[in-house]
Amino acid sequence: MQYGQCTLDNLNSSFYYATWVTIGICDNNAYYEGSLLRVIRSIFGLAIAYFAIVIALLFNFTLINPALAETSTITSSHLPVPETPIGKTIFNNNCASCHIGGANILVEYKNLHKEALLKYLENYKTNPITAIITQVQNGKNAMPAFKNQLTEAEIIEVATYVFQNSESGW
């Protein structure tokens, strides 16, 4: 072993390393350089892990969205749905002028209550959120289409908000 190339890894024990540094066989700077390198690698590794977690969360919310699934074996009415304050804001800004409180000011019986949605929205019984998304995107009769006014994420938020409120009775 040459002078200055001793590291804790080479010597297998901090006791031996400290002894060799004390008697001058090993250069003390080699230990500190190795330690600094290990710290930098640890910090870099943690940064990569946090970055991977953030990316995974982003892809989870944007690429794997059950609301966009074509088929579903679980009905949405059996799943707990968290409240969506963003959906409420979008609803109030775009939909409440006609559907305030889940009503319909133009065609009273075509409101946003569960019974009416079951009756008038195609596929609401099997996949309610997708049925609402389709209605919001494309409109129908007196209802305008919002696919050019709202982003895909906003449409999902407002559809989830409508679903939540229709299930709870507005």
Image (cartoon, helix red, strand yellow):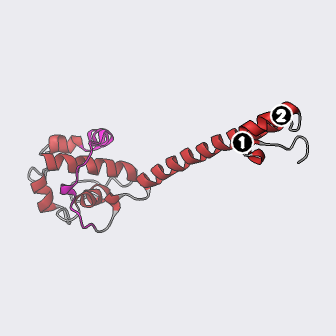
Mark 2 crowd level (few <14, some 14–19, many ≥20, 10 Å Cα) = many
Residue located beneath label 1 in the image: 13
Towards the viewer: 148 or 165:
165
Residue located beneath label 2 in the image: 21
Residue 72, horizontal then vertical, whole percent: 27, 66
Residue at the spot x=36%, y=55% of the render?
147
Residue at the spot x=47%, y=54% of the render?
59
- Amino acid at the residue labelled 2: Val
Does residue 79 sit above or below 8 in this rendering? below
Residue 84 is one of the magenta-drawn residues = yes
Residue 101, horizontal then vertical, whole percent: 15, 40
Q: In the shown orientation, is residue 56 left or right of residue 129?
A: right
Residue 108, horizontal then vertical, whole percent: 9, 49
- Amino acid at the residue labelled 1: Ser
Bounds of the magenta segment: 72-95
Q: Secondary structure at mark 1?
A: loop
Mark 1 crowd level (few <14, some 14–19, many ≥20, 10 Å Cα) = few
